[in-house]
Amino acid sequence: MQRGLDTRKRILKIAVNEFAQRGFKGTSTRTIAKLASVPHTLVVYYFKNKDELWITAARELFQPFLDWEFQYLEELKGKSAVERLKFVVAGFVRFSAKVPLFHRLMANEGREPSKRLKFLITSFNARSSKLIAQWITEAQSDGEFIAGDPFMLLYEIVGAVTNPFALSAEFKIITGRSPFAPGAVEEHLNNIMRLFFPERS
């Protein structure tokens, strides 16, 4: 029983990495089986087919995001719009450093319309995107966030936050340091804050 659970977890862990790094089209269940050192029939036994394996892998990868989202919705009750945004941006920087595969999977699936992209949007980020865009609008009206279309700014935040982690190998070659180092993560966070939240004189 435990051996079967361990095998399933190993397959799923590799599937998460492969789908995030190579996308759905670039990933094969046979490659996943080979990397997991199991017969291909076991992948089919536990996950039926590639589509089911992708859905399970996406849920596995996005569960930490949902846990974090639930946490911030609970902790932000009664806070101002700019306090909410600062909390969320700081949390997203640290989350992105901890789970870089999250953005890589979204970037792969976000390139063209598909049932997988619709699943991701519906299941994981439609609600939070609308909510954060609303907070941006409120903070802008108070002069505490830079001007611009809220949804465009939301995507610019996501891009600015995730880029060093998504391109970590390039970042390390160019800078000689890892974007995942604790000091680098906090420096990145401070830079993001200065970019989007105007300093009051």
Image (tube, helix red, strand yellow):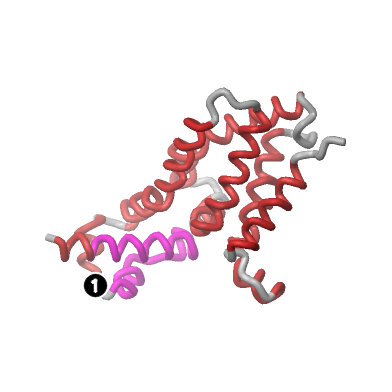
Give the percent coordinates (x, y) of residue 22. Answer: 48, 65
Which residue in the structure is indicated by mark 1? Answer: 38
As drawn, which residue projects farthest toward the right?
A: 201
As drawn, which residue projects farthest toward the left?
A: 1
Left or right of 76? Residue 142 is: right
146 or 150: nearer the eye? Answer: 146
Left or right of 193? Residue 120 is: left
Callout 1, which amino acid? Val
**Which residue appears at 57% of the width and 35% of the height?**
129
**Which residue appears at 29% of the width and 65% of the height?**
10
Q: As displayed, is residue 76 above or below residue 160?
A: above
Please identify the quarter of the rendering in which residue 16 is found: bottom left
45 or 100: nearer the eye? Answer: 100
The region drawn magenta spans 7-36
**Which residue appears at 66% of the width and 69% of the height?**
171
Give the percent coordinates (x, y) of residue 25. Answer: 45, 61
Judge whether residue 26 is colored magenta: yes
51 or 3: nearer the eye? Answer: 3
Q: Main secondary structure of the magenta part?
A: helix
Q: Quadrant of the N terminus?
A: bottom left
Q: As displayed, is residue 101 above or below residue 35?
A: above
Q: Quadrant of the C terminus?
A: top right
Left or right of 143? Residue 44 is: left
Give the percent coordinates (x, y) of residue 83. Answer: 64, 33
Left or right of 195? Residue 98 is: left
183 or 165: nearer the eye? Answer: 183
Q: Which type of secondary structure does the marked residue at label 1 adopt?
A: loop
Instruction: Bin the neighbour count of mark 1 within 10 Å (Cα to Cα): few under 14, some 14-19, many 20 and up.
Output: some
**Which residue appears at 76% of the width and 32% of the height?**
144
Judge whether residue 179 is colored magenta: no
